Every structure is written in structure tokens, then in C-alpha cells.
Amino acid sequence: MKVAKWGKALAVTAALTMFAVPVSAQDDEEGPMTQGDDARYVSATYVKFKPGKRERAFEIIAEHFMPAGEKAGTPGPLGVIHFQTGEWDAIFVWKLEGGMADLEWYRSPDNIKWYAALAEQEGGKEAAGELMGEYRSLIAEAQTEVGHYHATEDDADE
């Protein structure tokens, strides 16, 4: 299954975790500096599932969350990495289309569209809520970090 396909339905991952954003200013003698016009911001959510629950979590993602994302037409993550080693099971990397301002949303317009599609698909808000509750119950720990990269000529227009 293509990584991009996972992304369309994984908008929930960002909604399920609280942003653990360390705040640090990039200062020089003249004051704070921005990252520049070529900076593209991302959030990376690390997820650790409870023992024996990883398979069920990805089943929910594949069979429920992904189809809802496709139906809603919401953007997915830039990528998903499944770890073989280390303390985390997976990382979901999301492009912050609006830059750091995207962190101001409690629920973004895309998250609202995605959840509406999930509720329709599952037979109502109550059923969607139960599914979300089950998914959240599978997560032992999650942590989100925010960073940026500098666009190349190939992606400068994005």
C-alpha cells in the first residue's frame, strides 16, 4: 500500500495527540529571525501502541480512517514510517500547509471534513466516536514534534 494512501485517512493521528512543541527562539543580536520564505513546516507524530495492539490499530486505519480521508478529500501525511527498532512503533509526518499558524487550530477545517466523512461512513457520530475511542485505547503514548525543511527549486512553488 502506498505511503500517500495511508496519509489521507490518518488525519486522526494528529487530532488524537497533543502537540508537545518545545518553544525556542532563533535569536541573534538583532532579535528573532524567521526561517525564510523557503521554509516548509512539518509535524512528526511518534506513536507507541499498547502491547499486541499495533495490528488492530493499523486495521482501523486501513479499513476505516483511510476510506474516510479519501471520501473527504483531505490531505494525508507526507509519509509514515513503521519502526523495527526503538521505543516507537510508527511516525506520521504531516505538512503544515499554513506554516506554524496551523498549530493554532483546535480542529482544522480538514479535520472537521474528515470526521464528518467518518461519521457518515460509520453510520453516525456515535459510531464514529466509538471507533475513535477504540483507536485511542490502543495507543500507549504519542508525541508530536514540529520542524521545518527548506524547499528546493522542485518544491518551491508548493
Image (spheres, helix red, strand yellow):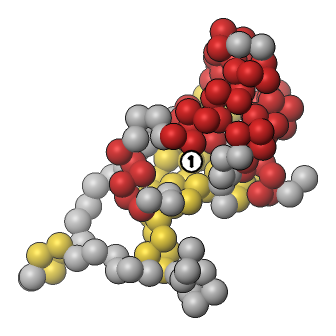
The quarter of the picture where residue 110 lies is top right
Q: Is residue 116 above or below residue 124?
A: below
Q: Is residue 75 above or below residue 34?
A: above
In which quadrant of the rendered view does residue 80 lie? bottom right
Q: Is residue 78 above or below residue 32?
A: above
Q: Camera-side residue: 11 or 82?
A: 11
152 to the left or right of 124: left
Q: How many marks?
A: 1
The structure residue drawn at horizontal position 55% and vertical position 80%, both measured from the top left corner, is 157
Looking at the rendered image, the quarter that the C terminus falls into is bottom right
- The residue closer to the viewer here, 21 or 49, is 21
Residue 133 lies, in percent from the top left, at 64, 17
Residue 15, image x and y in percent? Answer: 54, 35
As drawn, is 17 to the left or to the right of 77? left
Please, what secondary structure does the residue beneath circle 1 have?
Answer: strand
Give the residue type that dot 1 points to.
Thr
Q: Residue furthest top?
A: 126
- Residue at the image position 17 percent from the left and 73 percent from the top: 32
Q: Nearer the viewer, residue 43 or 72?
A: 72
Q: Residue at x 42, y 62 (%)?
A: 99
Q: Position of residue 95 (x, y in %)?
A: 56, 60
Evaluate whether residue 47 shows in this view. Answer: no
* Residue position for label 1: 45
Q: Is residue 3 above or below residue 107?
A: below
- Using the rendered image of the protein, determine whether residue 41 is visible from the camera's viewpoint: yes
Image quadrant in which you'd find residue 53: top right
Circle 1 Cα neighbour tier, 10 Å, few/some/many (<14 / 14–19 / ≥20): many
